Amino acid sequence: MKEFQIIVLVKQVPDTRNVGKDAMKADGTVNRAVLPAIFNPEDLHALELALRIKDKFPGSSITLLTMGPVRAAEILREGFYRGADDGILLTDRAFAGSDTLATSYALACAIRKIKNYDIIICGRQAIDGDTAQVGPQVAEKLGIPQITYAEEIISLTNDKIQVKRRLERGIEIVEGPLPILITVNNSAPHCRPRHAKRLMKYKHATTLSMRQQSEEDYLSATLTNTYLTIKEWSVNDIECDPKQLGIGGSPTKVKKVDNIVFQSKESRRLEDFDDDINVLMKELITSHIIG
Amino acid sequence: MNNIFVYCELDEGKIADVSFELLTKGRSLANQLNCKLEALLLGHNLKGFEKELFPYGVDVLYLADDKRLSPYSTLPHTSVMVNLFKEEKPQIALMGATTIGRDLGPRVSSALKSGLTADCTELEIGDHEDKKINKVYKNLLYQIRPAFGGNIIATIVNPDCRPQMATVREGVMKKEIFDPQHKGIIVTMDVNKYVDDTAFVVKVIERHIEKSKLDIKNSPVIVSGGFGVGSAENFKLLFNLATMLGGEVGASRAAIDAGYVEHERQIGQTGVTVRPKLYIACGISGQIQHLAGMQESSIIISINSDPNAPINKIANYVIIGKVETVIPKMIRYYKENTK
């Protein structure tokens, strides 16, 4: 039976969904430090689609690829708990300040180094930017087709894949050749939970530089269990044009960032008493706002 | 050369609203920059669409008419656009932040190595000074968009690469006829010159498009719920109130993420932008990303047990109380007063 080489692109993101009052600084900027760093939700859906392929074609392998600071290796470990086979952290100061185009360039270079792949899967978008650009930009750089907004893989053969896409007002089933890149919509199935045995196996998996930072006795652990060392690639490990990386390789520049100011209104305060609500409804009706 | 291009999107044989909105914005930017507004329409049987497009101020309309370009698929549309842009070198390119625009835009930007800003809420023209290299760029496109989950607003510029590309969500910008008598010219493209046969590798096997049942954008009354509503069960109260008032039910992102109602109802920067006569916010704390999608409503009522919820600041009426208590009373007194 056919075995597929799958790459899943993942990102560690600040949890912007629940930015409370404490996360906003007095000057109106966001205090990233107080936000928990999480596995980008749609990338978990992407991992689940990859795992479902592996369920059907057991010899298949799943490699996670992420770009970010050293700490981002946490989500690779999380991916191992759920069934990913391998993980690569692309980390270097040279990548700092990348916009979507520079990010997709770096990822595409890393994917070229991985070399063997049939399917690349990623979340549609990350919650810290919501741009949905990196997936298609990577596909273009690799010169392969893409299927965005995927919800389900309908069928997969040696050289073809059929995917159900979720559109604004309906669905579409499309068929494309391999290799291909797929971005996964948040209506796709949720990722399966951590696997207890895998949790035990991988809980000490870290990158070399993380171990060095924590001043652990890292040599003994890695000598006996190489799978516990998460691969860490720097700019020197990939073939790339440094001019297209990081802030210098990013065509978009942030000119300024503003706090959002809304026009405050003089609001009328009411309680949930019958009288208050009665008066309100009467007012809305007489002013022809309703009724 | 150096003009503004709008990719016009076809939605089941009709030009999408967002394309008209972009043409309206594009026209005003073109006037400011003293350049032409050009539109690009790809699909099949495109005759007659010029009558709809020219009144929005389109100076040049490129038509790529080919059976194989309908329905939309990524690679052929990318190829037409990239090759045309290589010839025409637009300074600005705009498209809708729809499933099509968000599939196509990044692909085109990646091929042209140009910057793309997604989901802009405002587009302006202005100058930009790069202090590091001591250079002033004149008349750049300010691409203004919410960032960081909608908690801040960022102005993005594209100093060196062209075109400056941006996507905009439907309903964010106004749609306005520029001049009903305006006439542009039509350029019929030789599609085979712009697309290679090898681009047609992804095939649409099946398509099921529902007639939109939901029309939140044009509803005069919206009863909207947030995480504070507490459950899908409690959302039924909102549906009751909305039905009675002839309105629709909307929701904040938090309520959608919690699974209380379907995605299509999301209001905010990553959902629909609305401007109803009456907006009733139930259990919505008022994250900026939500407020930006409804702040232009004429009358806003906030029902919230937290007197300090941020949404209260922009509300005309604030009812301090639980949604489960307040809505049944609203229903009761509406009925009593309209008898």
Image (cartoon, coloured by chain):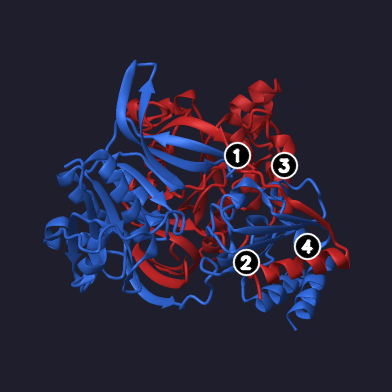
Chain colours: A red, B blue
Pinpoint residue B95: horizontal percent, then vertical percent: 35, 53
- Residue extending farthest to the front is A286
Q: Chain of mark 2?
A: B
At a point 26% along the width and 50% down the height, the residue shown is B5
Left/right placement of residue A97 relative to residue A197 reads left
Q: Which mark is residue B230?
A: 4
Q: Which of the two discs, 1 and 3, labels the residue nearer the N terminus?
A: 3
Near mark 1 (Cα within 10 A), the count class, few <14, some 14-19 or many ≥20, is few
Pinpoint residue A50: horizontal percent, then vertical percent: 53, 58
At a point 82% along the width and 55% down the height, the residue shown is B305
Tag 2–tag 1 contact (CB < 8 Å): no
Pinpoint residue B190: horizontal percent, then vertical percent: 11, 61
Q: In what element is the residue under mark 3?
A: loop
At a point 29% along the width and 47% down the height, the residue shown is B93
Q: Are marks 2 and 3 on the same chain?
A: no
Q: Measure the C-alpha gap from mark 2 to mark 1.
A: 23 Å
- Residue extending farthest to the bottom is B339
Q: In what element is the residue under mark 4?
A: loop
Mark 1, residue position: A261
| Nearer to us: label 2 or label 3 | 2
At a point 54% along the width and 73% down the height, the residue shown is B214
Q: Which mark is residue B222?
A: 2
Q: Are marks 2 and 1 on the same chain?
A: no
Q: Measure the C-alpha gap from mark 3 to mark 4.
A: 18 Å
| Nearer to us: label 2 or label 4 | 2
Mark 3, residue position: A20
